[in-house]
Image (cartoon, rainbow, N blue to C red):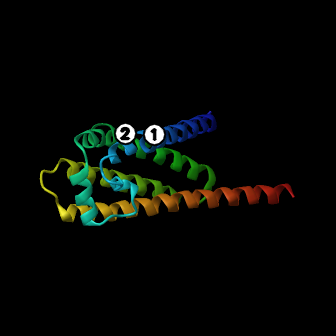
C-alpha cells in the first residue's frame, strides 16, 4: 500500500509540476514581459543587475503587474510545493542510504519562496529599493543553482540505480 501511495504521489506531484511550469512559461510570463522591452521577469534570469530590476519595474505595464501579482505569483507559491514533493519522492526512491539529499529540494523551495516574497515587495513598493533588488538577485541565483544541483543529483542517482540493477542481472 505504501509503495502504491508513494507512486501515486510521485505521479501527481510530477504532473502538477509540469502543468504549472507550462502555464507559467507559455501563458503568464510572456504576458507579463510583453511591455518590458525584452527584459525577463526576475526569476527567469540567473541574477540581474539593480539597474535591470529598476528598468523592468518602470516598463512593466499595469496589466503585466496585475498578472504578476494576482496570477503568476500565487501560482508560483504552489509551484515549490509541487516540485519539492516530486523531487523529495524521487530522491527517496533512488537515494537509498543517502537520504540527506532531500535537503536540496527543501532549500530550493525556501529560496523560491524568498525570491517570490522579494518580488511581491518590489512590485508593490512605491519606491524602488536597490538593496532589495540586489538581495533578490542573489536569491534567484541560489535558487537556480539549487535547481540544477537537485536535478543533477536525481539523474546521477537514477544512473547508479540502473547500473546496479544491470550488474545484478549479469
Residue at image position (26%, 39%) is 63
Residue identified by numbered label 1: 20
Q: Hey, which quadrant is residue 4 in on the image?
A: top right
Front in this rendered view, residue 163 or 67: 67
Circle 2: element type: helix
Residue at image position (41%, 57%) is 107
Q: In the displayed structure, does residue 68 sit left or right of residue 9? A: left
Q: How many marks?
A: 2
Compare marks 2 and 1 and give the one earlier in the sequence.
1
User: Which residue ends up furthest to the front in the rendered image?
Assistant: 37
Circle 1: element type: helix
Label of residue 164 in the image: none
Q: In the displayed structure, does residue 12 sit left or right of residue 160? A: left
Q: In the displayed structure, does residue 130 sit left or right of residue 43? A: left
Residue at image position (52%, 41%) is 18
User: Residue 29: percent from the left, percent from the top?
Assistant: 38, 45
Label of residue 75 in the image: 2
Q: Quadrant of the N terminus?
A: top right
Q: Quadrant of the C terminus?
A: bottom right
Asked whether the beta carbons under mark 2 and mark 1 sit within 8 Å of each other, the answer is yes
Q: Hey, which quadrant is residue 42 in on the image?
A: bottom left
Q: In the displayed structure, does residue 99 sit left or right of residue 81? A: right
User: Residue 152: percent from the left, percent from the top?
Assistant: 57, 61
- Label 1 packing within 10 angstroms: few (<14), some (14-19), many (20+): some
User: Residue 33: percent from the left, percent from the top?
Assistant: 34, 48
Amino acid at each position: 500500500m505504501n509503495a502504491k501511495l508513494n507512486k501515486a504521489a510521485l505521479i501527481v506531484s510530477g504532473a502538477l509540476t509540469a502543468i504549472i511550469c507550462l502555464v507559467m512559461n507559455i501563458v503568464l510570463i510572456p504576458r507579463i514581459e510583453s511591455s518590458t522591452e525584452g527584459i525577463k521577469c526576475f526569476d527567469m534570469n540567473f541574477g540581474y543587475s539593480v539597474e535591470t530590476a529598476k528598468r523592468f519595474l518602470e516598463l512593466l505595464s499595469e496589466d503585466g503587474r496585475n498578472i504578476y501579482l494576482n496570477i503568476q505569483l500565487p501560482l508560483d507559491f504552489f509551484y515549490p510545493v509541487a516540485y519539492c514533493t516530486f523531487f523529495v519522492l524521487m530522491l527517496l526512491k533512488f537515494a537509498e542510504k543517502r537520504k540527506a539529499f532531500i535537503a536540496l529540494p527543501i532549500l530550493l523551495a525556501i529560496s523560491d519562496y524568498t525570491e517570490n516574497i522579494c518580488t511581491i515587495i518590489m512590485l508593490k513598493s512605491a519606491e524602488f529599493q536597490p538593496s532589495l533588488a540586489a538581495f533578490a538577485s542573489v536569491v534567484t541565483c541560489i535558487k537556480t543553482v539549487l535547481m540544477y544541483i537537485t536535478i543533477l543529483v536525481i539523474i546521477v542517482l537514477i544512473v547508479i540505480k540502473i547500473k546496479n540493477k544491470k550488474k545484478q542481472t549479469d
